[in-house]
Amino acid sequence: MTASGFPRAALFDLDGTLLDSAPDMLATANRMRASRDLGPMTLDVLRPHVSKGARAMLAAAFPAMEQAPREALVPEFLAIYQEELGRHSVLFDGVAEMLDALEAAGSTWGIVTNKPEYLARDILPQLGWDTRCAVLIGGDTLAEKKPHPLPLKVAAERIGIAIADCVYVGDDERDIQAARAAGMPSIAALWGYRQAHEEPTEWGADVLAEWPAELTQTTAWPSTGSSVGAT
């Protein structure tokens, strides 16, 4: 371990970590419910399921539907979501400042998400990140997705920074499992989406962060193989 400081590279989950995309997902689910003569669901019902993916959100939106026909709704969900993408979502408070602080320190940052790559890539220009995000790995980019470590390993390889010199930040247990399996330090983002029974203190993250603003300070990051500006 070296002196404390920002990591050479920070890799982030997208939904629930950088982006509060639940409102886009809610609009998608409610369009699907309306087309089936069902009333709207509320954000507080859907929000805990967002990080679990389309199937989990569909289960929340259509709890009375059998699994097989509900699984068949995934393409419809993704198609409608692409239309709603970025229309309602916002950055979590402090994310912009956190990314600015990383860049000012000379750190590289990128995104490793289980969202399909084409959807993740579509949102980058809306956020002004298409020229700032150094690497983007989606859930369908590779043969495996989180909690498998492959996406994190490939992301580090593509930016040319050793795994031990990167930190992964995510709001789901699968994020921390992937980081641990890859040998990458991790931060559990407590501001994100999770269900009532989930306990982040049991995930094995190196650091628990309450809010993105904490990560504008070097002391909030776990030690890595080397740190920007370390002596």
Image (cartoon, rainbow, N blue to C red):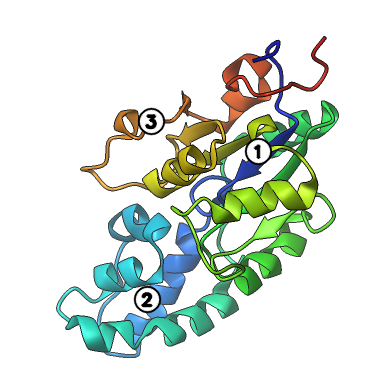
Q: Position of residue 171 (x, y in %)?
A: 45, 43
**Residue 30: image tag:** 2
Task: Check the image and report above or below for 35 versus 50.
Answer: below
Q: Secondary structure at mark 1?
A: helix
Q: Secondary structure at mark 2?
A: helix
Q: Residue at x 26, y 77 (%)?
A: 39
Q: Which residue is mark 1?
A: 163
Task: Check the image and report above or below for 212 versus 75.
Answer: above
* Of the pair 72 and 100, the residue shown nearer to us: 72
Task: Check the image and report above or below for 160 versus 67.
Answer: above
Q: Amino acid at mark 3?
A: Gly
CA separation in Å, label 1 and label 3: 18 Å
Q: Residue at x 44, y 87 (%)?
A: 76
Nearer-N-terminus badge (1/2): 2
Q: Is residue 69 left or right of 52 when viewed as pictured? A: left
Q: Amino acid at mark 1?
A: Ile
Nearer-N-terminus badge (3/2): 2
Q: Position of residue 151 (x, y in %)?
A: 58, 55
Q: Which residue is mark 3?
A: 204
